[in-house]
Structure formats: structure tokens, C-alpha cells
Image (cartoon, helix red, strand yellow):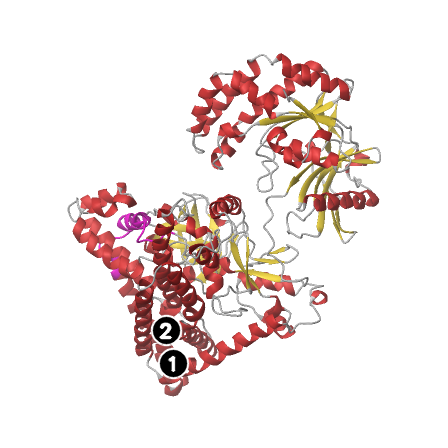
Amino acid sequence: MNYILHFNQIDRKSIPLVGGKGANLGELARAGFPVPPGFCVTTVAYRQWIDANREMEQWFDQLKHLKPEQLDEIRRTGEKIREQILDVPFPDLIKAEIVEAWKELGKDYAYAVRSSATAEDLPTASFAGQQETFLNVKGEMPLIEAVKKCWASLFTDRAILYRAKNGLDHRSVSMSVVIQRMILPERSGIMFTLDPVAGHRHTVSIDAGFGLGEALVSGIVSADLYKVRNNGIVHRQIAKKEKGIFPVAEGGTETRELPPELQEEQVLPDEKILELAAIGRKIEKHYGSAQDIEWGMEGKQIYILQSRPVTSAFPVPPAKDNNYRIYLSLGHKQMMTDYMKPLGISVMRTLVPLDKSSACDESQAYVEAGGRLYLDCSEVMYSKFVRRKLSQVTMPDDDLSALKKAVLREGFEKRIPKKRMTRQTFRIWKLILDLYGRLLPRLIRMMVFEDPVMVYKRVNSAFEQELSRLQQSVDQRSGAERIRYVQEHVGGKLFFSLLDSLACTFVGIIARSKIERLVKKWLGEELSASIHKSPPGNVTSEMGLLIGDLADIARDYPEVANYLERANDSTFYKGLREVEGGDVFKAELDRFMEKFGMRAQGEIDITRVRYKEAPTILVPSILSHMRSNNPNEHREKFEQGAKEANEAIQNLLTRVRKTKGARKAKKLSHLVHLYRNMTGTRELPKYMIIRYFGVYRDAFLEEEKVLCSKKIIDHKEDIFYLTFNEIIALMENRLHTDVKKLIRSRKQLEMHYQKLIPPRVMTSDGEIFTAERSNTEAPPGALIGIPVSAGVAEGFVKVVRRLEEGSLGKGDILVAPYTDPGWTPLFHSAKALVTEIGGTMTHGAVVAREYGIPAVCGVENATKILKDGQYVRVEGTKGYVKILDKKNESVC
């Protein structure tokens, strides 16, 4: 039996036999890196022991049914499995081979015995720290006991929980054990071949301490931090190191206080820092990816103790050239930072007219990284004029703040390429000028010559006609011809069909800016928040009102309300017909779905499930509305908001007329009329896009049924893992690849990418930039954000990460990662809004102002810091959130 493999018999392909850790050590040793000698007890030994232990089958069956939230049951089950593994006698044949290999390496040495599971230290999952390590093991019996403990550590609470959370079959993971001659390092630590915090790919980051590296991993000591870039030390941070972990003569380790003269001494001399960084770069080059490396230094010799891929770093977009580039997240701007499937990415890149040779091409200005879209804004940022204007911007906007940090720092200008006017640059500026030329006449016409009420009707009417023509054209086609037609419409017509609605939006923004400036100039005050309430023409506000109507019907028919509590999507409408009032509720729901059924959370991704496909998504919002509002209260609030806005407007105009004269009052009146009737169109362009997406999505799903019936793809929605061109090629038998294998690989990548947090701004070096924000008015300990909707509110926190979880009580403070129009059903139940992402003109801000509820956006990690049931004060005017100790604290 193949129970033992020495490092010189192992390479990176040996994972099934020796796990990720063992395979990496063998690969490093065979490549000539300074690795202490050792061998692995293979997974064959573990599997043979498991197969011989009949009770393990029962334990695996129990583990299979455990859910991540069953922490007590996981703890009890894991403890019993570990006890059994440690109690069962060790197999003689396996023991004999381990002892023979140990003697061959030298029985008088101390050894490190480390777990090496087959699902750890992989390119997309490091699994670091899931199993056990035993250091300074001496003697035959302690060695065998350490191997058994490594096997048992496959069933620690954290290992079981990790597999359960990541959908891994407990049977499928095997355990190898690494037995490695232990060096006795005076200095040790961890090295990343990229900056793990800033993400910079050309920076080597080294943590160093005295004694064994476990002191750093366990967190009992602060480490020195060195950063190396371009063969030079660019950062040196010397920590006070009070303790260290050291081996003891009889075996094992102990924690000791360091002598005072060592506590603030630099652990590594500069020449060793550079030598270690050079080794790290060679290891990175060998593997072809960034590495997380454990190292130790005995005397003057540096040893590599482990190397694993860095899986937590967000991928850098593929480079177009060797120039330094700046990337801005589309997801942060569109309030949707989740992973997007390949078809969602493909549709969005096709839609954008920037930097493409033909309508059906995908935009080269938008690039994919980690399943998210980024705008390559480098060419624009190379412009000195743009950078100067950017430096002058004072409005609170996280995107602009992060971009400022990236391009206004020292050294950026030196990295700008000398040849700036490339074909790509020309295309971008040509489009900008083209759009300016198309929008300017529209803006002038709407602001000066047209009645805004009639403009809104005209724009809506034209859109509905175009949508009807699209639906007819799509229905008349099938197969590849249908998908190609959709592609042509996405790339050639969609964007430019939005110009009138975009012009409406800009008119509203311009009018508001002018009003604020004139009120400040003429009256010396800020514009009243009441003026923003309940404007006409906001489709998203209308959606919220219709949710309230549905809630009122459910309240009138208790059987409907009870049914909604237990409804599921597959039988939703059938069950609704069987309860009293179900037909009335369904009629209203049909009216809702006709206009808003294509909306969803994260709706810019066409692959996301829509309301009309999963009506239960709306149920928490309907039930929350029933609990939080009286009958017809939502309509009354909207009407009251409109009344307050009109009163504020009349008051404002009266004061301007008295102090500045009729002429200026008339000018202001015109601007207010424009603003009130155009600000609602802020949501219109996106609404139009999503209505178009509804037609496209239906076409994809119909063609998917054909592909499934022909066994070309296996499952519903597999088509979403292909791009536009791949789908067309597949339908025309031109896709020369195993499509099922391609889809499986992309699903595996999706599982990894979903866990990553996308940066707002990043560079081609992988360096990450975040927004900087300060608030002198905020009290100590407050969470700082952007003030986007005036007012102050106190209430209990309700954290909602997904719309389906959106069950709010009356007076709850809605805390969410972001809100897009799909979240609007929750707004009637919320007393205030707090989001992690967003700014003054994002969806949540606009709707919060219209509903008259305080809101603070851009509060970093709000959904992690704030907990359900905490009592907080939301300062929408000053831009912060304060956690209160007592409910009866007064509002400041």
C-alpha cells in the first residue's frame, strides 16, 4: 500500500494523495526551494482507516443533515467523532511505514506534524487554520498520536462548519498528514507576495517575530511589518514584541517573555528582508499566482515552511496594455455589488456604447473582474484638465473621493503614458462629445420651451411604443436569429432610446442645483427638505404605493394574509385562488406585475430572478406594510407629502417676491415647476432598461427550454453562464468546446467570487482605494456616512441583506448593504435608512427624500457593525448614525 510519500516523490498534482499542504511542500522541495525535509502519510492511509471503521458511515450520514446554524449539534457530533478516532487502535501496517520513514529522516530530530486536507490550500480556497498542527514532536508514540489527532481534526467544529457553509460533502474530503523535520528558528513569520490590505500586486509584505511563527498566527504578539517594492524597502514598522513561542527540550512548545533588549529590536536585518522578498517573488513566479508563505530563519539560513495561494485578493482586470490603469466599480454606482453571471456581464458590456467597433461588440471600456464590472477610466484620468476639476469637487461622493485618492497622489503623473491619444481614447472622447451634442438641444428645449408635464407624457408614450415594437419583433423570431436580434437591440438601440429620459433626469438635477443656489443667494438659507417630498412621475414611488394597496387588500381578507405566510412560488397563484379574497388580491397583483413584474433586487443583472417569476419575494414587504401602516396610510402620507411640498413652495415664492421682487419670484417659480415635474424621472431611465430586460430575459428563458430539451445543457438557468456570442455560437453549432464542462467550471468560480468583496476603485497593480470621510459634527463612536435625506429619527435596527429577508416592524431603521429600485417595497415600513453604499443621487437617497425619512448612505460595514434590535439615532442632516445606550436618550 502507498501509505508514505517523501517530498521528492510529490508535486502539485499530488493533492488527491497528500492534500494541498503536502502537495505544495513537495512542489517547493522539488523546485529547489529551501524546504526542511519530510514525508506525508497519504490519504490512502486515512481512507483505509475510515473504511475499516464501520461507525463512521453513520457519522457521515448525521453530518450530511447538519445545517450551519445548528452550532450545538455540530459541536456535539464533532466531539463524539474525534473521541472515537482517538480511541480506535492505530493500524499496524500504517504505523510501521510511518516509523520506518521517520527513522530514515532521523529519529533524534524534532518534527512538525501538520494536517493536510484534500480541500485546502487550493487556488480558490485556502481553508487555512481548519485543521491542526503539532510542533516539536519527539519520539515514536507522540508522533503516532499526533497523526491520529490530525485525522481527528478533520472533524473539529470549525472544519465541519466550514464544509457545511461551503456545500462540501464531508465524505469527499480526505486527510493526509505532513511530517516534517522541524527547524528551530530564532526568527519566523508570514510573507505575502502582494499587499494583503492595499492589494498592490508588486509589493511583498512580510510579518516577522522572534521564535516560532505560531505566535503571529495565534495573535499573542504583534509582528514587525516590512514592505518591499522594486527591490527596495518602502515601509518598515517595528512593533513591540513582548512574547514569543519557543520549542522545549522534552517536546512541545511554550510561550515566553522576550528580554527587554529584544522587544523593540528589528527582527530581520535589511539584507535578509530583501533576500526573503526575492525568494517570495521566485515562488510566486513558479506557481503563477500570489502566495501566502510561512518562513523561518535558523542561524542565517531562511527556510520555507509552507506556501499557499492567496485566495482573498480581488482579481485584477485583464490588462489591455502595459500602461498603468484605473478601474471604477459599476456595481457601487448602480447599488449592486454582488457577483454577476457571465450573461449579465455580457449584456451590460454590450449595452454600453463606449469603446466598441460595432453595435454587437462588448464594450472594451468596461472590463470584468471577479464577476463584477469595472469602468476603465484611465484615458479620462490621464487628462490634467479632468484631474484638476476632480480636485475641485467638494460634493460628498464615495466614487469621486476614491478616484481622488488614486489619481491625485504623488507619483501618479509619472505613470501616465506619453502617448495618450490612442484609438480607444479617441473613441471615448468622440462618444462624450456625441452625447453632449445630442443631449444639449433636448435640455434647452425641455428647460425653456416645453411644459414638463407634457414632456413626461411624451417620453413615456414613445417608450411604450418602442417596447411594444421590440416585443413583436422578438416574438416573430426564434433560435439564434432571436438571440442575435436581442443582441443587436441591446447594443444598437437601447442606450440611445434613453436619451429623452436622461435629458428629463438632467433637467431635474440642473433645476434643483439652480434652486438651491438662488435660495442660498437670495434668502441666505438651505432649501427646505419638504420641497422634495412626493413629486409626481416617479415610477419607483408608484411601485411602493401599489405594494401598500396589496397590503390593504390582504388586511381586508385574513385568509389571503394567512396564505401569504405559507405560500411558495411553484403553487402561488393556484393556492391564491383557493382562499377567500384571493381573486381580488390576484387582480391587484396582476396590475402590479404588468408594470413592475420585471423588477428585482440587483436588477441590472439580467440573470436575477424577477418578481413575476418569484412573487414570494414581495411577501415580506407586503406583510411588513400591514404591520407598520394603517389602511390607506401610504396614500395619505404621499398626499400629505405633496401638500407639504406645495406649501413650502408657496412660502418660498412669497418670501422671494417680497424681498427680491416679482421677476425673480417668477424665475424661481419656473425652476420649481421644472424640478417638481422632472425630479421623479430620476428613476425613469433605469426603469426603461429593466422593462427592456424583461423582454430579453423572456427570450433567453424560452430558448433555454429548447436547449434543455435537446440535452445541450443540463439545468434551468445554465444559459446564464454563457455570453451573448457563446449562446449564438452554441445554437449555430459553432461553439467548439464542451459546453457542460464550461458551465460547471464557471459555477465553481462563481462560488469563489461570491465570497469576495469588490473594491470601489482599483488599479492595474491591484491597489485598492476607498473613500475618505470625516465629520466634525459627529459625536465620538458614531458611524460616519453621507447625509442624503434630512431629518433625525430613532428606532430599532433591522439589518436586511437580501430583499427576501425584508420583514420590518413599525418604526424600524432599515440597514442594508445597498438599495436599488427593487428594494422600494420596504420604504413605507422604514422609519429611516442606512446603507453601506450610495450617495446623494443614488436610489435610496432619492426615494428617502421623497418619502421624507432621514437617510445616511456610505456607512462602511453598517450591516456588520449594527445588529438587529439595537436602538440608534440616524442623523440624516449631519450624516452619521449613533448607537444609543438607552431608548429614552433625547434627540440632539
Q: What segment is highlighted magenta in the picture?
A: 609-635
Q: Secondary structure at mark 2?
A: helix
Q: Look at the image and say whether residue 619 sits in the magenta stretch.
A: yes
Residue 247 on the magenta segment = no
Q: Identify the residue at image location x=44%, y=49%.
A: 872
Quadrant of the image occupied by residue 603? bottom left
Please tell me which residue is depicted at 50% across the width and 78% down the height of the picture: 434
Label at residue 678: 2
Image spot of residue 305 (x, y percent):
72, 33
In the rendering, at what x and y percent does residue 774 appear?
57, 58
For residue 776, side relative to residue 623 (left or right): right
Callout 2 amino acid: Met
Asked if residue 679 is positioned above or below residue 876 in the image, the reply reads below
Q: Is there any visible trace of residue 461 in the rendered image?
A: yes
Residue drawn at 17 percent across, 44 percent down: 578
Q: Percent x, y for residue 850?
A: 36, 64
Q: Residue furthest front?
A: 733
* Residue under the image location 37 percent in, 70 percent down: 681
The prevailing secondary structure element of the residues shown in magenta is: helix
* Amino acid at pointer 1: Met
Disc 2 vs disc 1: Cβ atoms closer than 8 Å?
A: yes
